[in-house]
């Protein structure tokens, strides 16, 4: 008997349908999930006096770089300012300056005469230490700014030196031009005066409205009276969703269900794809995704490009009780290269599913490919504190759903069409929320293909 003929009489051993795009989905697995009743989750916070620092956007045409006027409201002194005409005049007052490595934009202690916005490149903040050393306090990168914090200050001076670490493009607004704009726009002058007043209100180190307390006193002294003020417009998170309509021909379901149920396998693969999309949205969605909704003062850049142990320590120190890092596998590899160069051994920990993850300072570093790599071969590392009891990051999902097959996911039969096609609606509902701004932080501009010279 021929082999081919014998095979026709044999029973094959087959696998269920396989799917290459299934990932480890560590973010979905490691987030604590809160049940949201009514489809909306409100995050109540203590009143903040501190105005957050956003990032200005640009439009580039060849070598010409211009500020998008509407994004100037990301500068703290202009937050909430709505006169578009004045914003356009401010935007037109910026000039473009090409910089080279080593160029000094401002000297520590010198009067502030210009406001800088970095359109492209890397600028270091340097300050003189207590014993005369020069300390690097941080890095300014694309879209961030310096000098605007001096608005409303009498005779402002630079608290740090700004030195260019790379070639780049900087947009410059002269102080004299700003003073002239303020003089010709009474509304702008009043807005800046109000900003200065709010900035001087009593606040704690996190920028929250101060609660007057007394400590260290003796005897029967008068105690200060106070109250804890709340935000009047707390943020609300509505549940987002990912859906698909799965179509299965009844002939397939009727005739080819042995040994595997075709409908069940189709639904299983559809659910896997929806979960992959859900995790991508938790990272990238503009309304609630972590990369777009992390507070700007919780974002730092690498000191020199590749992610070093120093950069990871800086990210770790920005919040209490950091308990998870998430990074693209290539970013983890770049970090390991830097550790190898320094002769450092990175430990690993065993996860609940039996796999292992690296740890840094005892905090697991979970691979998360959905963070992605930019066209400039850079990525981002996410650090977070998790859980509602710890004022951390929580995932959001609805309570029990009709026809639920997994938490927050249901499969509903939609009937059979005239073409004998059975239709199933597969839906997942979800969102993610940091309960306080420092619950999550980002290490940005992580170069994954370049090594620092020895």
Image: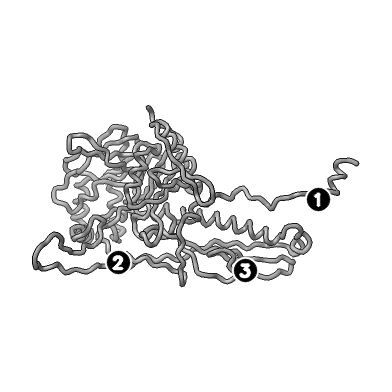
Q: Earlier in the sequence, mark 3 or mark 2?
A: 2
Q: Which residue is mark 3?
A: 412
Q: Position of residue 78 (x, y in %)?
A: 27, 56
Q: Which residue is mark 2?
A: 231
In this orientation, which residue lies closer to the viewer: 257 or 361?
361
Q: Which residue is mark 1?
A: 11
Rounded to the nearest angstrom, the CA distance separating label 1 from label 3 is 35 Å
In this orientation, which residue lies closer to the viewer: 261 or 411?
261
Point out the residue furthest to the right here: 1
Label 1 environment density (alpha carbons within 10 Å; few <14, some 14–19, many ≥20): few
Q: Earlier in the sequence, mark 1 or mark 2?
A: 1
Numbered disc in front, either 1 or 2 = 1
The image shows residue 322, relative to residue 32, as above or below, that is: above
Q: Position of residue 48 (x, y in %)?
A: 27, 61
Is residue 105 at all visible to an observer of this figure? no
Picture quarter containing residue 166? top left
Q: Secondary structure at mark 2?
A: loop
Rounded to the nearest angstrom, the CA distance separating label 3 from label 2 is 40 Å
Contact flag, marks 3 and 2 (Cβ < 8 Å): no
Q: Secondary structure at mark 3?
A: strand
In this orientation, which residue lies closer to the viewer: 376 or 346?
346
């Amino acid at each position: 008997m021929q082999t081919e003929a014998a095979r026709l009489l044999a029973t094959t051993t087959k696998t269920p349908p396989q799917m290459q795009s299934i990932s480890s989905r560590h973010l979905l697995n490691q987030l604590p999930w809160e049940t949201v009743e009514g489809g909306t989750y409100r995050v109540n916070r203590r009143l903040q006096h501190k105005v957050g620092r956003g990032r200005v956007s640009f439009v580039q045409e060849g070598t010409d770089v211009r500020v998008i006027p509407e994004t100037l409201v990301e500068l703290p002194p202009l937050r909430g300012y709505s006169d578009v005409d004045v914003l356009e005049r401010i935007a037109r007052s910026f000039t473009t300056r090409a910089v080279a490595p080593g160029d000094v934009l401002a000297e520590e202690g010198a009067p502030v005469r210009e406001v800088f916005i970095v359109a492209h490149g890397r600028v270091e903040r340097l300050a003189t230490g207590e014993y005369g050393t020069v300390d690097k306090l941080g890095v300014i990168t694309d879209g961030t700014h310096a000098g605007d914090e001096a608005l409303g200050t009498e005779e402002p001076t630079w608290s740090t030196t700004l030195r260019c670490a790379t070639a780049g493009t900087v947009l410059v607004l002269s102080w004299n031009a700003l003073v002239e704009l303020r003089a010709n726009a009474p509304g702008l002058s009043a807005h800046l005066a109000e900003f200065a007043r709010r900035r001087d209100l009593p606040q704690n180190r996190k920028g929250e409205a101060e609660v007057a307390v007394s400590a260290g006193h003796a005897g029967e002294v008068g105690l200060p009276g106070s109250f804890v003020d709340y935000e009047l417009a707390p943020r609300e998170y509505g549940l987002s969703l990912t859906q698909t309509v799965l179509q299965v021909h009844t002939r397939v379901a009727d005739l080819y269900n042995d040994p595997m149920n075709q409908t069940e396998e189709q639904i299983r693969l559809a659910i896997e794809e929806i979960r992959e999309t859900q995790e991508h949205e938790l990272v990238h969605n503009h309304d609630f995704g972590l990369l777009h909704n992390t507070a700007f003062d919780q974002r730092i850049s690498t000191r020199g490009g590749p992610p070093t142990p120093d950069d990871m320590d800086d990210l770790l120190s920005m919040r209490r009780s950091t308990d998870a890092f998430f990074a693209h596998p290539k970013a983890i590899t770049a970090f390991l290269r830097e550790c190898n160069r320094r002769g450092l051994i990175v430990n690993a920990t065993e996860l609940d599913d039996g796999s292992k993850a690296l740890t840094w300072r005892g905090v697991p570093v979970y691979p998360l490919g959905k963070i992605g790599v930019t066209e400039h071969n850079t990525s981002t590392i996410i650090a977070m504190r998790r859980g509602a009891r710890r004022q951390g990051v929580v995932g959001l999902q609805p309570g029990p759903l009709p026809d639920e097959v997994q938490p927050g996911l249901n499969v509903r039969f939609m009937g059979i069409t005239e073409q004998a096609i059975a239709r199933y609606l597969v839906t997942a509902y979800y969102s993610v929320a940091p309960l306080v701004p420092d619950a999550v932080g980002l290490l940005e501009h992580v170069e994954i293909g370049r090594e620092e010279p020895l």
